[in-house]
Amino acid sequence: MILVAEGDRDALAALYERYMKRLYNYVYYRTHQRETAEDIVSDVFIHALEKVHTFDPKRGNVSAWLYRITRNLTIDHFRKMRPMQNIEDVWDLADDTDIVRDTDTALKMREARNILQKLSPEQREIVLLRLWDNYSFREIAEFTGKSEGAAKMAFGRALKSIRTDLALILLLPFLLHS
């Protein structure tokens, strides 16, 4: 980070190459809009470059710092889009033609949205970070400011809730026909 702060273009390029895809995936899975994800990630690196002097390795690693910037800019995006809605309750799985190509997929996406919507915003965030973004519990703890144990516990509780909902969905057709 010192080299980036000193204006070393190679260091900045290396930082971009290392984190761009993960940050893009994080934003895309939440907005489901390529252009929006690209814009936000570009803003992340501009913001990081402007604020590189605020990076403190004692408070976390570069990955956690970039993730916090990304998360905050994504929240800002949703605030601009939905100023009257509580940002903690936003869950946007758009029916984008890039995502939903057929009826079967649309139904599965709707079921997933409904199940995830039942989770608390904190649980939803941890599930997405773990399952979609493939972060370790240590990384999730750094990103969210929780202990690793608390992140694991929230994830476990979320999975238990998801399993219960899935069991009901799978059993419903049999209960209706009996």
Image (cartoon, rainbow, N blue to C red):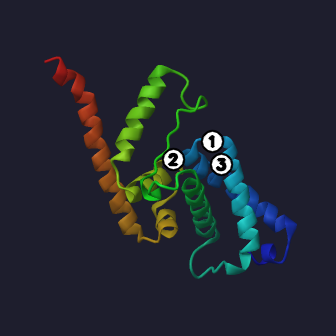
Q: Earlier in the sequence, mark 3 or mark 2?
A: 3
Q: Which mark is residue 33?
A: 1
Residue in the picture at 53% in, 32% down: 95
Q: Which mark is residue 37?
A: 3
Answer yes or no: is residue 20 visible. Answer: no
Q: Amino acid at mark 1?
A: Gln
Please identify the residue farthest to the top as the structure is shown.
177
Q: Amino acid at mark 3?
A: Ala
Which image quadrant is residue 74 in? bottom right
Please identify the residue farthest to the left as the structure is shown.
178
- Percent position of residue 34, x then y: 67, 42
Distance between the alpha carbons at the discs numbered 3 and 2: 15 Å
Q: Amino acid at mark 2?
A: Trp
Residue 106, relative to residue 79: is it above or below?
A: above
Which image quadrant is residue 73 in? bottom right
Q: Are marks 1 and 3 in contact (CB under 8 Å)?
A: yes
Distance between the alpha carbons at the discs numbered 1 and 3: 6 Å
Residue under numbered circle 2:
132
Instruction: Provide the secondary structure element on which disc 2 rests.
Output: helix
Answer yes or no: is residue 13 visible. Answer: yes
